[in-house]
Image (cartoon, coloured by chain):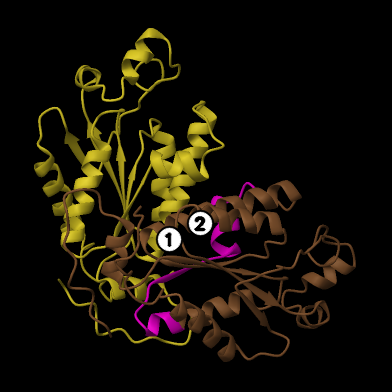
Chain colours: A yellow, B brown
Amino acid sequence: MEQVATNVHWHNGEITRTDRENMLSQQGATLWFTGLSGSGKSSIAVALEQALAKRNKLSYRLDGDNIRLGINNNLGFSAEDRTENIRRVGEISKLFVDSGVIVLSSFISPYSNDRDTVRKLHQDNDMPFFEIFVDCSLEEVEKRDPKGLYKKARSGEIKNFTGIDAPYEAPSHPDLHLNTDSQSLETEVDLILELMEKNGLLAAPTSQRNKES
Amino acid sequence: MEQVATNVHWHNGEITRTDRENMLSQQGATLWFTGLSGSGKSSIAVALEQALAKRNKLSYRLDGDNIRLGINNNLGFSAEDRTENIRRVGEISKLFVDSGVIVLSSFISPYSNDRDTVRKLHQDNDMPFFEIFVDCSLEEVEKRDPKGLYKKARSGEIKNFTGIDAPYEAPSHPDLHLNTDSQSLETEVDLILELMEKNGLLAAPTSQRNKES
């Protein structure tokens, strides 16, 4: 286990994001997992969360379970509601990044525009954002179909289901492109940790940062 | 500076709130500051945030600046929108508590029902919630009027202003009742820290907790 930073000097002004990140010896960031239902977004986030905890890094998962049933329980699955769903999740992710936490946001988030809005929201505030495409063929997710949703979508019992009768716009330039048809969970977690290391997220911020918030 | 907990054993399941709290040596909790505009909610939250940082505790402030301009930028000040504003803030507070963070939520939150909804949301999930009434006479806040809002409300330039032409329902049983007419900021912060100490929030959770989330 690492010791928390000992070089933090609290000033009299407001505590900043950098102060919190120094306390946590990490950088707040959003890792955004997008992909079809059943592609493995949540499994990867859960495994990554464990790997980060082993390194004593504080992360938090946002997903349908704590968002759709909570703050967004007044939203459905129309195109308009999907956009508002992702907008709110983007804003919540930003708040967590500001608090110093590493956010693991797992949402189908089928529209490029919506994901780009979330990316811009972070970049405009000098906050790290990484789009991770959890790619899996429709053939494979339909075979997995852990909740039986594809079957219901094919039969028409469920409408507006992404990949069946609602669009999925694949990322054109994701920060990381995973293929869960073929890769192991372990490989996927390693690739993400490598991305995080390379971007300095697993250590306190350097003094080069210009903006504080 | 304290060292982070060294008695944490990561398991293979999902990382729980208790795991995160052990890592942070604190308990996630919401401190909810309610009171008139200009009563001192934000000043107290800022001072408390500093005091907590000195103790190496991770807190995060939610207030109009990062909520009204962000996730709730599609809400106004009608009774209905105020209720939705507080509902969303309550849900976001709950997510932060789940992440292990101490949340300092400063909102006028004039309606008892809305505050009670947030309290229930926390209590139903075994999450600490403390309502802190930042009490200040209307005479005094009108004298302070740091943003000139009361003057505009009196002249009718601003409508639906709490305390002038919109109601403020004072808490009947707050967990802490501060009086900013007479108390010093230092005293107020000490009273809150005492409340937090008494409720064990400034240490890792005890093993007696039954529910994990």
The image quarter containing residue A167 is top left
> Magenta stretch containing residue B66, yes or no?
yes
Front-lying residue, A78 or B182: B182
Residue A147 appears in the picture as rendered? yes
> Residues at badges 1 and 2 in contact (C-beta under 8 Å)?
yes
Look at mark 2 in the image and give the residue it sits on.
B122
Q: Earlier in the sequence, mark 1 or mark 2?
A: 1
Disc 2 marks a residue whose amino acid type is His
Location of residue B44 in the rendering, given as x and y in whole percent from the top left corner: 58, 80
Q: Which residue is mark 1?
A: B97
Position above or below: B33 against B19:
below
Which element is circle 1 on? helix
Magenta stretch: residue A151 in it? no
Q: In the image, is A27 to the left or to the right of A11?
A: left
Name the residue at 52% across, 26% down.
A78
Residue at the far right in the pictured view: B155
What's the magenta region? B51-75
Chain to which the residue tagged by mark 1 belongs: B
